[in-house]
Amino acid sequence: MADIWLMRHGAYEGHRPGYHAPHEAALTQEGREQVRRSLPLPEDVTAIVTSPIPRARQTATLVSHLTGLPIVATTGLLAEWRAPSIVLGRSAETYPSAYRAWRARRLANPSLRCEDGESLTDLHTRARHCAAFLHHTAQRHGPLLAVSHTLFLGVLTHPQEGPAAFVTAARTPWQFTERHLFTPFQSPALRLQRPDR
């Protein structure tokens, strides 16, 4: 089976701990430098797939430009967890009461949504579909680099935890441009490769 490498995007505008980035948040100059420092990629990578969210798409486009590798798919399956719009651009100290109430009940009722946000069950289901998509895309194009987001990547790489993987993902965020080798449908144990910083 062809290797699949997962990578978080680079640093973006307005980032701070616990912050829910607006959809349109773009890479910063430091984010672009992080992408450059993350190279070279593993030698066998032949193609790139990416989330459509700008900070991931910009990361993938820069990697493509610097390596000559094609972007063969842009898919919402790799998008970040869809946080409710009431928390976008906010961090923990300013979360509204409706979101705080959802957080208190989300594990007891993982199908519960906060307003227009994605439920934990929906997120876990999307991650399972994404794993199948990555597997099939790698069969077609060879070893892949998939560019995505920290919460989604955390859920994707902890399928055995079910919807509760969201909490694990929030507690153990990926660093900007950090990479893991991903083996869908097998052990969640991953080989870690951090770029030089």
Image (tube, rainbow, N blue to C red):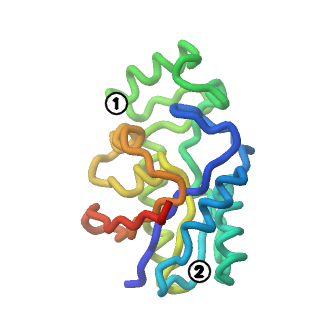
Give the residue drawn at x 64%, y 24%.
86
Q: Nearer the viewer, mark 2 or mark 1?
A: 2
Instruction: Tell me, yes or no, if residue 191 can be seen here.
Output: yes
Estimate the x, y position of residue 68 in percent, counting from the top left.
68, 83
Give the residue drawn at x 50%, y 86%.
142
Please state which of residues 97 and 68 is positioned toward the viewer in this rendering: 68
Please state which of residues 173 and 104 is positioned toward the viewer in this rendering: 173
Q: Farthest residue to the front: give it.
A: 197
Q: Residues within 10 Å of mark 2 (few under 14, many from 20)?
A: many
Question: In the rendered image, which residue does mark 2 sit on?
Answer: 47
Give the CA distance from mark 2 to mark 1. Answer: 36 Å
What kind of residue is marked 1? Leu
Estimate the x, y position of residue 63 in percent, counting from the top left.
65, 72
Residue 166 drawn above or below residue 49? above
Pointers 2 and 1 in contact (CB under 8 A)?
A: no
Along the horizontal axis of the image, is 117 left or right of 187? right
Estimate the x, y position of residue 163 in percent, counting from the top left.
36, 42
Instruction: Tell me, yes or no, if residue 54 can be seen here.
Output: no
Q: Residues within 10 Å of mark 1 (few under 14, many from 20)?
A: some
- The N terminus, quarter of image: bottom left
Along the horizontal axis of the image, is 72 left or right of 100? right
Along the horizontal axis of the image, is 168 left or right of 74? left
SS class of the residue under badge 1?
loop
Marker disc for residue 107: 1
SS class of the residue under badge 2?
strand
